[in-house]
Amino acid sequence: MISLFSILLCFALISPTYSGYAKKDVSKNLKVPTPDENGNIPTLNKFGFLYEDVFIDPFTKDFIIYSTQGTKKILEIGAGYGNLSLEILKGGVAAVINDLEPRHLDIIKQRIPRSLLEKTEFKAGSFPGDLDFPEGSLDAVFCRVLQFLPGKDIERGLEKVMKWLKPGGRLYILLPTIYVDTASKKVRESFDKKRKAGDPWPGMNTATSDIYPKTIAYNMPETIHIFDMDVIVNALFRISFEILRVGYFDRYYRFTGETSSGKQGLGVIAVKPGVDTEKKNED
C-alpha cells in the first residue's frame, strides 16, 4: 500500500471554501514535519502527534469504510495534516475539515488534489466553541481532541454533535487511556480515588509529564485528560447516544517502538438514535 503521507500535491492557487479564518496565500514553506523513528509526526501547535499510517486502529478503519459507503457529509475534528481526510475524500465524501491550527489547514490545502477541492470545506477553530452546523446536516463526525478539553466542554461538544448528526449518524472518538504503560503510579491512584468518589471526569488535568516520556511530552500541553471505557461511555449515555462499539487498542509502539497490554488507546462508535434511512433503503 502506498502511504498517503508520500503524496504531496500543491495547488496553491485553488481557493476552496474557508471558514473561521481569513483567506490568505498559502505559505510555500509550510510542510509536514519529519516523523520520528516510531512514525510520530509532531503538530505545529504542540497539541500532540499525528501518524503516517492512517489505518492505525480498528475504529479509524471503520470510519473510512462507513464514510465512503454512499454519499455522505462528514466532519473531522482535529484533522492535523489531513491523512484521514485525504483518504475519505478519495471515496467521494463531502468533508468539513477542522483544526485548531490554521497552518495545519494550509498544509492540507496543498495536499488535496484539484478534483477533490470542490467537496472540501475548511473550518479553523476550537471544538466545541468555534464550530456550529445546521441540525441534522452531518452523517458522521470523527473526533480525536477530547483529551485536550475539560469535562464541561466535552459534554457541551457531545450535545452539539448530537444536534449536528442525522438520525442514525455516527460519532467516532479516539482517546488516550489510564492504561498507558508509561503513566506513573500516582496517576493511576489519583484516577481510581476520584472515580470512587463519584467524579465523572477522574482523568482531567493530569500532568502530561506523569503519563508520557519526554520524547512525547515535549510536544503536548502541560496537562491532558485521560480516560477509561466507563468514563466516556457514561458521558455519551448522559447525552442519549447509543453505543455501537467500544474497545481498547494497542498504540504503545507509537511511544517506544514496543508493544504492550493493548489498552493504551480507546475507541468509541456512538450513534444518534433514529432511523438511518440510507442504510434502511440499502437493506
Image (cartoon, rainbow, N blue to C red):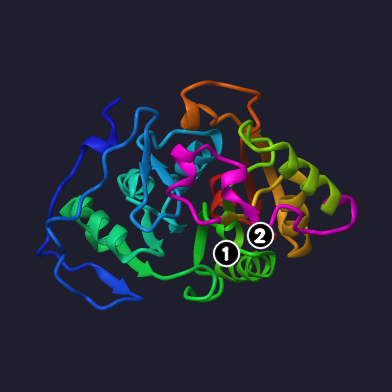
Residue type beneath disc 1: Lys
Are there few (<14), some (14-19), or many (20+) residues within 10 Å of tag 1? many
Which quadrant, please, contains the C terminus? top right
Residue type beneath disc 2: Lys
Give the numbered dot on residue 166: 1
Q: Earlier in the sequence, mark 1 or mark 2?
A: 1
**Are the residues flagged by discs 1 and 2 in contact, CB closer than 8 Å?**
yes
Q: Which residues are magenta?
A: 195-222
Q: Secondary structure at mark 1?
A: strand
* Quarter holding residue 180: top right
* Secondary structure, magenta segment, majority class: loop
Observer able to see residue 277 = no
Q: Residue 101: where, in percent of width, then height?
A: 36, 63
Q: Residue 15: where, in percent of width, then height?
A: 17, 68
Give the numbered dot on residue 272: 2
Indicate whether residue 25 is drawn in magenta. no
Give the left or right position of residue 243, taking residue 134 as reference.
right
* Quarter holding residue 116: bottom left
Q: Residue at x 51, y 58 (%)?
A: 139
* Viewer-side residue, 40 vs 96: 40
Q: Secondary structure at mark 2?
A: loop
* Viewer-side residue, 158 vs 51: 51
Give the numbered dot on residue 70: none
Q: Residue 113: where, in percent of width, then height?
A: 19, 50
